[in-house]
Image (cartoon, grey):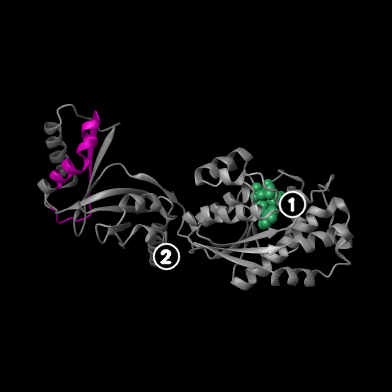
Amino acid sequence: MDEMILLKLGELVLKGLNRRSFEDRLIANARRQLQPYGHFRVYARQSTLYVEPRDSQADVAGAFEAMKHLFGVVGLSRALSCPKDKDAILDTVKSYLGDRLSAAKTFKVETKRADKTFPMTSIQLSQYVGGELDDAYPHLKVDVHHPELTVYLEVRDYAAYVHADPEPGAGGLPVGTAGRAVSLLSGGIDSPVASWMMAKRGLALEMVHFYSYPYTSPEAKQKVLDLAGQLTGWCGSLTVHVVPFTAIQEALMRSCPEALFTVLMRRFMMRIAQRVAQRIGAGALVTGESLGQVASQTIDAMRITGAACTLPILRPVVGMDKEEIVRIARQIGTFETSILPYEDCCTVFTPRHPRLHPLPGEIETAEAGLDIDGMVEAAFQGIERVRIH
Ligand code: ATP
Ligand code: MG
């Protein structure tokens, strides 16, 4: 059986003149994500991406699961192709969907006819195949409104395709079509979700992680690399820039008011992330901040943090409740790793009474004696880059 996968394109069908480059990117992303599953042919026709195995070694079931994580796809089905002939189509439905027809009580047939030279209309083909199936499976009843099983027939330029109900795709836009950004990835619940949300809107991401050895353990760093690994299923290969952050934190502890420690530290995070962004040609930063969740996530604190850099800071979870963020974390598979109990650099140095509403003037005073550029540059030079496939 030459079973294949049909992917329905989402929003990118609206892209007009840019559509071709969106499709090309989607195809490249699909090919990359299919690599572990064998050899496939991938091409686009009529708002659909076709994924066809090139040989019998290819793992179609594995590929199907991988394609559920491909941004830019709204629905996907495993399908069987057959000649464009009503009886060939009927035979294919019986052999390919026979088990499902036997298990269902109600069904309907729905035909899409892209090839207008096909001698029957969509309705005629649906009626023909539906009638024959009704006879062949006496327990089955036609229900056009709420069928348990819908048999889809698609008559296209080169072949006809038979499949059952499509499964929902990942949605969004192909990764890389919206440019590039640097995402600040901690070991928490929020930042992997924020990264996923922006990748879904088409951003290609590189990760920055601030690491405070020996205050935080190698396990804490490994946890972040594991989270990045889980995101590669959606984003493709990722680079994690692991920034040595201990010296900066110690300098702030020595010379700055304790109540301002977190916001001052976060300003350094933004400066260093921006330095990484300049190096890789990224146009924005991404964080997992959520309004009011902790002291450093008040509007005043976010304003002061954001003022340390010029790039826009994207905060996709800013208006979400923790519960909503957790729901996505579970859905994308990062939650269990995120809740592993390793200290993050922020929790190790949390002040007892952080200032909820820091003022620009007091930040300026606190930073006056610091060699900011030198500290940023030293951290940047110490970066360890880890490529995750
Ligand atoms: P998360 O669950 O993402 O860790 P959080 O609720 O713990 O977020 P904070 O610790 O205030 O919140 O961090 C806010 C954001 O700052 C994080 O979502 C992340 O984007 C960034 N951040 C915090 N700590 C680090 C770190 N060690 N390395 C990289 N980014 C960090
Ligand atoms: Mg955190």
Helix, strand or loop under label 2: helix
> Residue, x 57% and y 52% (percent of image)?
227
Vertically, is 371 above or below 4?
A: below
Q: Measure the alpha-carbon separation of dots 2 and 1.
A: 37 Å
Q: Is residue 310 visible?
A: no
Q: Nearer the viewer, residue 330 or 344?
A: 344
The percent position of residue 279, horizontal first and vertical second, equals 63, 73
Residue 104 occupies quadrant = top left
Residue displayed at 86% across by 50% down:
259
Which label's residue is closer to the chain start, 2 or 1? Answer: 2
Residue 13 at x, y = what percent? 38, 58
For the residue pair 129 and 120, the one nearer the viewer reads as 129
Magenta span contains residue 194: no
283 to the left or right of 174: right
Q: Nearer the viewer, residue 247 or 40?
A: 247
**Amino acid type shown at disc 2:** Arg
Ligand 1 closer than 8 Å to label 1 CB: yes
Which residue corresponds to mark 1?
A: 346
Q: Which residue is denoted by mark 2 in the rendering?
A: 25
Q: Is residue 87 above or below residue 40?
A: above
| Circle 2 or circle 1, nearest the eye | 1
Instruction: Name the residue at 66% across, 55% down.
Output: 218
Would residue 340 be seen by someone viewing this image from the given angle? Answer: yes
**Tag 2: Cα neighbours inside 10 Å, few (<14), some, or many (≥20)?**
some
190 or 54, nearer to the observer: 54
Q: Which residues are magenta?
A: 89-118
Q: Name which residue type carries label 1.
A: Cys
